[in-house]
Image: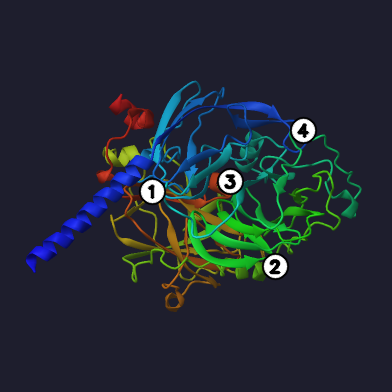
Amino acid sequence: MGGKSWGSRALVFWCIVLSLIHVSLGSKARHFKWEVEYMYRSPDCLEHVVMGINGQFPGPTIRAKAGDTIVMELTNKLYTEGVVIHWHGIRQLGTPWADGTASISQCAINPGETFKYRFKVDRPGTYFYHGHYGMQRSAGLYGSLIVDVADGEKEPFHYDGEFDLLLSDWWHLSVHEQEVGLSSNPFRWVGEPQTLLINGRGQFNCSLAAKFSNSSVSQCKFRGNEQCAPQILHVHPNKTYRLRIASTTALASLNLAIGGHKMLVVEADGNYVQPFAVNDLDIYSGETYSVLVRTDQLPSKNYWISIGVRGREPKTAQALTILNYFPTSASILPVSQPPVTPRWNDYNHSKAFTKSIFALMGSPQPPKTNHRRIILLNTQNKIDGFTKWSINNVSLVLPPTPYLGSIKYGFNNAFDQKHPPDNYDNNYDIMKPPVNPNSTHGNGIYTIDFNTTVDVILQNANALAKDVSEIHPWHLHGHDFWVLGYGEGKFREEDEKKFNLKNPPLRNTAVIFPYGWTALRFVADNPGAWAFHCHIEPHLHMGMGVVFAEGVHRVGKIPKTALACGLTGNKLN
């Protein structure tokens, strides 16, 4: 009996070893050399300065396989500002210094300097990258990061081809003017974007569907080589295509629809979900989805793909491109009008979609209980007359020394050692503007015991103006979290009984709806210092974020170049 037991254990051991060898042999290091620079482009048919990589806008697409290592030499060719790149959705297991968050995981890369990122992409999925210094995402610093399944593995669904749709918004006001306006008294809001872009392309002064418009906008006439000409999706009839959709928007919440076609949602933020069919799809800044589209319509026609604004009263025209069926010419425009975007404030429509997302059977399930609960109240406030966003009445201001280095090497004077509050005054009325709008700056962090389970309740509230509560998509670095539930009004203790612990989706970005709450659960099992913030660029610029630190003493060697500023720069160099 003992011999059989030993033999079975040995068999299991060697199976594990062989599987690890298989993964190791299949993975590879993928090397890139990038230069970030400003350049002239016409993303919406008007010429402006954009931030690009190696002469490209958007930046080059990274394609890798699960288990691969990305080695990125990034050179800052900007003249007067630093730069970092965040690899959105990549957990950075063992490499928290490569997360690409200025003042949190690393120092900004100075003009003329080169920094080498090295990290593993451990899971397949649809991801992207973007600048995380100032508001450089608004300037155009972003691109796609696609991770395919490892050799020998299969997706849980079939498709014949795929397309990437990178969605963004675009202003004619420069990012520097936007930043100055947000930091001014009187406050100057950035306004609604002038144009929505699909893969960096949109049309401001003309429309692909002018004949269906009530306005005097002219019909776009393209030869096809213009920088603002739409990238057309060429398909064959009776095939299944995967659309990988990512929203890098600085502000806009979006809705995507394809005329005459349903979409089957199969992936969200790099995690498989229970497939469900939709006519249109809401996507918030920081989110990614994969949908399957069956080309089962008349091949003698072409069909609109439309992107419209949700959650804010739209002053921006839809972005359009075309689903072109072979053998029909791509120059033949669809005969019907583009899909109509649901009304901007139809939140029931948005909530119905969001609440339809469940984890695919077999996905990791959340721990049944938590060790700590943190409730984060989102409010708009004033500090010395300046308009800010605050979390539990603290508006985040990042320190000169990156948290990762100052915590690991014990620089206790590098930031405020007083922890921010885990909750807010229970008497606070979330349905009204704050009675006392004054807030305070801070750079304290939430220190979380390693390997514990944390619940975060994102609580929305009324802004400074009466009857205004905005949508906020929140993104967590270094982790996925389970979305346990959504609710209306103020979160109550009894709401925990409604949590979905059976099949909650794993995400890295989650939305809170106006005057509502969203409940998240994650395990603090990834040593590092991690940003958690609203993914709306102006809101983060105005202080809407927090920092979680867990197990930093467990972090291995950090490259000196990651910490070559502030107190760590003086100590380590």
Badge 4: how crowded within 10 Å, few (<14), some, or many (20+)? few
Which residue is located at x 61 percent, y 65 percent? Answer: 514
Q: Write down the residue under mark 1.
A: 444
Q: Earlier in the sequence, mark 4 or mark 1?
A: 4
Q: Write down the residue under mark 3.
A: 537
Relative to 511, does residue 152 appear above or below in the rendering? above
Q: Write down the residue under mark 2.
A: 346
CA distance separating discs 2 and 3: 24 Å
Instruction: For marks 4 and 2, give the one nearer the viewer.
Output: 4
Task: Check whether the beta carbons of the residues at disc 4 and disc 1 lie within 8 A of each other.
Answer: no
Instruction: For marks 2 and 1, give the one nearer the viewer.
Output: 2
Q: Earlier in the sequence, mark 2 or mark 3?
A: 2
Q: Is residue 544 visible?
A: yes
Q: Position of residue 452 (x, y in %)?
A: 30, 60
CA distance separating discs 4 and 3: 28 Å
Element assignment for label 1: loop
User: Residue type at mark 3?
Assistant: Glu
Q: Earlier in the sequence, mark 4 or mark 2?
A: 4
View extreme (left): residue: 2
Q: Earlier in the sequence, mark 2 or mark 1?
A: 2
Element assignment for label 2: loop
Which residue is located at x 12 percent, y 65 percent? Answer: 4
Q: Position of residue 570 (x, y in %)?
A: 32, 26
Report whether 94 appears left or right of 360: left
Q: Write down the residue under mark 4.
A: 226
Residue situated in front as seen by the camera: 434 or 519: 519
